[in-house]
Image: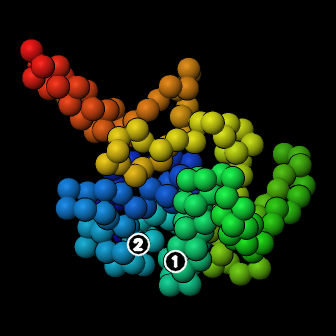
Amino acid sequence: MTAADPRPLTGEPVALDLLNTRWAGDGGPLDLFAGAAGLSRVEGLAVWLESTGLAGRFRADAPTLVHLLTAREALARAVADPADESARALVDAVLEHGRIRPTLTAEGPGERAEFDDRTWGPAWTAARNYLELLESAPDRIRKCASESCVLHFHDVSRNGTRRWCSMAACGNRAKASRHYARTRER
């Protein structure tokens, strides 16, 4: 049985969910792959694989974690600065470890991912998902507007104006801060 996911934001597309394995806690930065919530690095990987639906396809082991950390760093740099050529090269380097193979299924045309080494599977899947997000709505990939928050989300709101990773957490803190500032001015 896998431990509970301690992260404050889950359920984002795989690429952003990978970025959200690092977050700001009360005592400072936390990392799901570096002992957050008392989990070992590989246990943190198992939690992440489970939460993203990849647990049945890939193993939580040290080589997979090393590749996933490589992908996380590449994606973090690419999201922070989409014009950064070296960041794009890092994402491309992760993508070189897999490919999409067209298939014919009982339902018709299909495709499946193939990897030169299965331990690259989760990393490649996250990098591939980032490309899909860029294809569909690059302007909807957002960092939380809170200065103290490092989380990312895919804005699926109808009008595309979501600002916070969570209205219950960062959004509420911002509203309370504005309210406090207004009442203090009076």
| Relative image position of residue 121 (x, y in whole percent) | 66, 71
**Farthest top residue?**
186
Above or below, 126 against 97 in this view is above
> Residue 94: in sight, yes or no?
yes
Query: Taking 92 as reference, is 175 above or below it?
Result: above
Mark 2 crowd level (few <14, some 14–19, many ≥20, 10 Å Cα): many
Comparing 60 with 26, the one in front is: 26
User: Which residue is denoted by mark 2 in the rendering?
Assistant: 33
Q: Position of residue 129 (x, y in %)?
A: 66, 53
The amino acid type of the residue labelled 2 equals Phe
Residue at (20% x, 31% y) in the render: 177
Q: Residue under label 1, please give it.
A: 65
Residue 125 visible from this viewpoint: no
Q: Is residue 38 above or below residue 145?
A: below
Q: Secondary structure at mark 2?
A: helix
Identified at 77% across, 79% down, the residue is 116
Which residue appears at 61% of the width and 66% of the height? 74
Q: Are marks 1 and 2 in contact (CB under 8 Å)?
A: yes
* Lateral position of residue 111 relative to residue 72, left or right: right
- The span from disc 1 to disc 2 (Cα, nearest Å) is 8 Å
Give left or right: position of 19 versus 165: right
Q: Which mark is residue 131?
A: none
Tell me the quarter of the picture where residue 126 sits. Answer: bottom right
